Image (spheres, grey):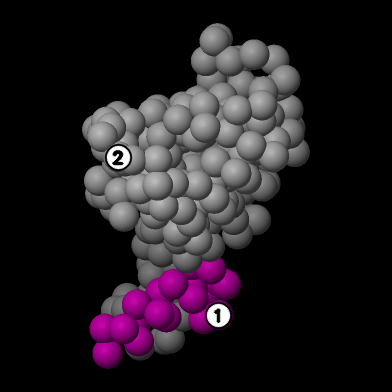
Amino acid sequence: MLERDQAAIVATLLKGPAQLPGDLFAGSEAAVLRGLRVHANTISHARLVALEETFPRARAYLGECHFNRLSRDFIESGGAGHRTLADVGAGFAAFLSDPIAADLARIEWAWLESYHAAEAPTLGLLDLAGLSETALLALSVRRHRAARSVSLASDAAPLLDAAFAVGTAQILITRPDADVRLFAIDPADAVALGRAEQNPTLGNLIALLGEMHPDGGAAIAVLIDAGAFEKV
């Protein structure tokens, strides 16, 4: 009964009063609709606040008024769907037409995904110390579950960190310890991270990066030091 009543309320909020069973609430139809409007406004406000807190850099770039207007358009167009407040911003970046704002939002969403990812031991350079060359090359690696790579379609990188150069095409987000960290990386590094989904050996990743980098070993060391891989 509870699930049926909850489904009826959700359908009413999404599709209008025609979805509301007549015997669900006591009181006149006008009073019930007033109560539902208050409830809907409360949900809408909570979603707007959640978007503000999820995308502070995109909000700063767009300006408060413009960001709020876009947020309302996103919610009223059904972009929030049946999502919880924690997930309400999942499709927001794709909704933004400004390429810089969209890139900032995608990075901020990836930052949140990294922050909330499950714990896993990070592979560090110290873990490689003492291994023979054969053992080193045969070591299985895997992309850390908190690592994310975001391709940029604009020059948004300097708005994230003044140290990032204009023209940066790829951002790596990692969480090797408690803090989420951002790095500017090459597109080739992103390819290697994608390959690391398949549990390759370290030797295979070095060979892959060696096809695109002058020194594949140095490139893989940078990714390891950034916390991009987990111990297998």
Q: Distance between the Cα atoms at labels 2 and 1?
A: 69 Å
Which residue type carries mark 2?
Leu
Please name the residue shown 47% across and 65% down the image.
82
**Where 220 sits versus 65, above or below?**
below
- Residue 145 shows in the view: no
Please name the residue shown 52% across and 27% down the image.
218
State which quadrant residue 100 falls in. top right
Q: Is residue 21 left or right of residue 119?
A: right
Stretch in magenta? 1-19
**Is label 2 in a helix, a strand or a loop?**
loop
**Where 11 sits versus 4, above or below?**
above
Residue 18: assigned label: 1
Magenta-span inclusion, residue 4: yes
The picture places residue 75, in percent across and down from the top left corner, at 57, 51
Residue placed most toward the observer, 53 or 132? 132
Residue placed most toward the observer, 65 or 136? 136
Residue 131: assigned label: 2
Which residue type carries mark 1?
Ala
